[in-house]
Every structure is written in C-alpha cells, then in structure tokens.
Image (cartoon, rainbow, N blue to C red):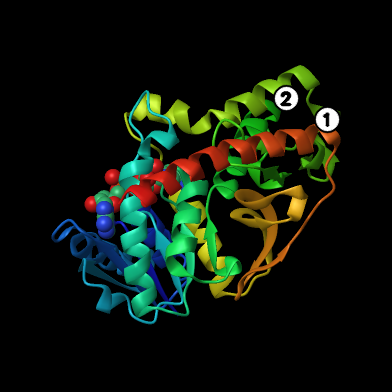
Amino acid sequence: MKVTVVGAGNVGATCADVLAYREVANEVVLLDIKEGVAEGKALDIFQKASIDLYDTRTYGSTNDYSKTANSDVVVITSGLPRKPGMTRDDLIATNAGIVKTVTENVVKYSPNAILIVVSNPLDVMTYCAHAASKLPRNRVIGMAGILDTARYRAFIAEELNVSPKDIQAMLLGGHGDTMVPLPRYTTIGGIPVTELIEAEKLELIVERTKRGGGELVKMMGTSAWYAPGSAAAQMVEAIVKDQKRVFPVCMQLMGEFGLHNVYQGVPVVLGKNGVERLLEVSLSEGELKLMHESAKAVTNVMEVLDKINAAV
Ligand SMILES: NC(=O)c1ccc[n+]([C@@H]2O[C@H](COP(=O)([O-])OP(=O)(O)OC[C@H]3O[C@@H](n4cnc5c(N)ncnc54)[C@H](O)[C@@H]3O)[C@@H](O)[C@H]2O)c1
C-alpha cells in the first residue's frame, strides 16, 4: 500500500509520521513545493523507525508528482493555515488555487486513488478537489468530523473525568461555526450523555467545540496539527485496511437530508472503496434546521469559489 501526503507542513508531516508509526502503509510519500522540506521530514521520520520500531518507508519529493505514482490514498494538506482573527473562509482564494493544481497533478499519476482533503475551508476545498479530480463522490472526501468529534469527546471527558476512549459521538454539517454536534447521538460507555451532563453545561461544551479550532489558533498563532494529522491518518487506515469504520466525513450530498450538491459532514462507512455507505440517520426538526443552515453557509462559500473560477 502506498499513501501520499501533499503538504509537508504541520498537519501533513504529522499525518505522515502517524501513518509510519502505525505502519498503515508500506510506503508514504511526502510532497511539498518548498525545496527540500518534504525530503528532510521524510528522512527524519525514517530515521525514527529503529527507535519506534516500524517498517514503513517514507520518501520526500519537492513538487515531483512522478514519485507519488500509483498511490492508493492521497491526503491533501497543502495550503495556508489560519492566523488569529481569520475565519477558515478567509483562506479560500489562495487555497482553492493550490488544491485545484495539486488535485490535477495527483490524479494524473494516481487515477485510482482515494483523496482525503484537509485544507481549509474544508467543505469548499472538498468541492474544489472533487470537481478538479472528476472522480466519483465516494472517492473524494474531507476530514473535519473526526477532528471535531475528537474535540467534543475531549471536552466531555474532561468534564466527567472519564477516558475519551469511552465516548462515542456523531456530528454533522460543515467544518465551521455552523457545525452540528448531536448530543442525542452521544454516549459514554453506552450511557446517553444527557443522563450525565446537564443541558446547560452540554450546551457550553457544544459551543466550545464549534470554536475549538479558533481557540487553538488564538493560543498558537496558527492552526492545530497533532489532532488533525492523526484524524486524517485514521481515515487513511480505515480505507487501506478496509475497516468499515463509521466516521463523520465531508462529502457531496445528492438529496440526502434534503440537501443537493452541497458538501457536508455526514456519518459514513469508510472502507477500501472510500465511502461505502452514507448513513442517513433520522434527525429532529431542530437538528435538520441546523444542518440546513450549515449547508447554506457552505453553499455561500461554494458560490464565491464559482465566481473566482469564472473570473480566471
Ligand atoms: N480539516 C481540518 O480539520 C483542518 C485542521 C487543521 C488544519 N487544516 C488546514 O490544513 C492546511 C495545512 O495546515 P498546516 O498547519 O499544515 O499548514 P502549514 O503552513 O504548516 O503547511 C502547509 C504546507 O503546504 C505547502 N504548500 C503550499 N502550496 C503547495 C503546493 N502547491 N503544493 C504542495 N505543497 C504546498 C506549504 O509549503 C506548507 O509546507 C491549512 O489549510 C489548514 O487550515 C484543516
């Protein structure tokens, strides 16, 4: 199995490191436009193999896509991260150009790959990559839901002083302030969260989750990478090992939840074909309303991207 990670910055390098450490693939290629950076980080990760005891071979490439040929999965992390005061949508003009070019190069050399988009604004960059790749929708997906639920699970674990491992959660909608965490589908060791955390406190946790990315940008001056890198690697693992894991991922909706041609986080079964099944869970009127609001926010940014594309 061969996996390529485009963008050897904070998120991309972390993802490659986790893929190697967990021996998800035999070969991991890291690619970046900055001369030598991907080669250096790939070599650094490989030099860790005898310490951390893994066999994965990591290679680097400065913008030479022939080295990524025949990848089974490609993770796209190239693009600018947020700075304090920025929204994810502020990144669109720069990152859309990067993601489009990268996708075209990736597909040229790996026409059978499954693409996982990480660059922000996530939902619209997934749209961008899907359009540029011309691949079916089950093969071009975005990573946000695993990260957002991981943050939500961390906050709940902190509140209850329990292991984050025992918290199961589902989250819908876009990767932004309009995301829709679903307390109704959250359990702690099988116990509904509503039994253990009072409504007001849970609402504060939901609100903190929505702003979870911004909280870290404020602290660090750039966006997070450990949890995002691991989340992307977890999606790769589910695909490469055909695990049929159930995760929230971003993909194009074609009528599901009453939404058409918009990119949203939804629960899916992830396996060797990418998205193998979309789980269209039943939503309350209020939850569906929130999801449609989230979809509207994404549609607005998709329209901005369409205008940019029409102008060039
Ligand atoms: N989906 C999520 O949940 C999530 C979470 C965290 C970060 N992100 C996003 O991921 C992206 C990367 O974040 P980061 O912190 O790793 O940023 P970073 O600046 O550390 O790394 C980005 C890398 O992309 C490279 N790059 C730029 N243009 C390229 C091109 N055309 N081809 C190849 N490489 C190119 C840069 O040289 C840089 O090394 C950002 O857009 C960020 O907003 C998404």
Q: Position of residue 36 (x, y in %)?
A: 14, 61
Residue contact between numbered discs 1 and 2, judged by CB atoms under 8 Å = yes
The reply to whether the residue tagged 1 has its Cβ within 8 angstroms of ligand 1 is no
The quadrant where residue 141 appears: bottom right
Identify the residue under disc 2.
202
- Density class for disc 1 (Cα within 10 Å; few <14, some 14-19, many ≥20) is some
Residue type at numbered disc 1: Thr
Residue 159 can be seen, yes or no? yes
Residue 179 or residue 226, whichever sits in front: 179
Which SS class for mark 1? Answer: helix
Residue with the most extreme left position = 35
Identify the mark nearer the N-term, 1 or 2: 1
Q: Position of residue 61 (x, y in %)?
A: 22, 68
Q: What's the distance in space between the residues labelled 1 and 2, CA to CA?
A: 8 Å
Q: Is residue 286 left or right of residue 236?
A: right
Q: Position of residue 187 (x, y in %)?
A: 79, 41
Identify the residue under disc 1.
194
Q: Is residue 185 above or below residue 272?
A: above
Q: Residue at x 78, y 38 (%)?
A: 288
Q: Is residue 75 above or below residue 67?
A: above
Q: Position of residue 273 (x, y in %)?
A: 61, 75
Residue 50 or residue 250, whichever sits in front: 250
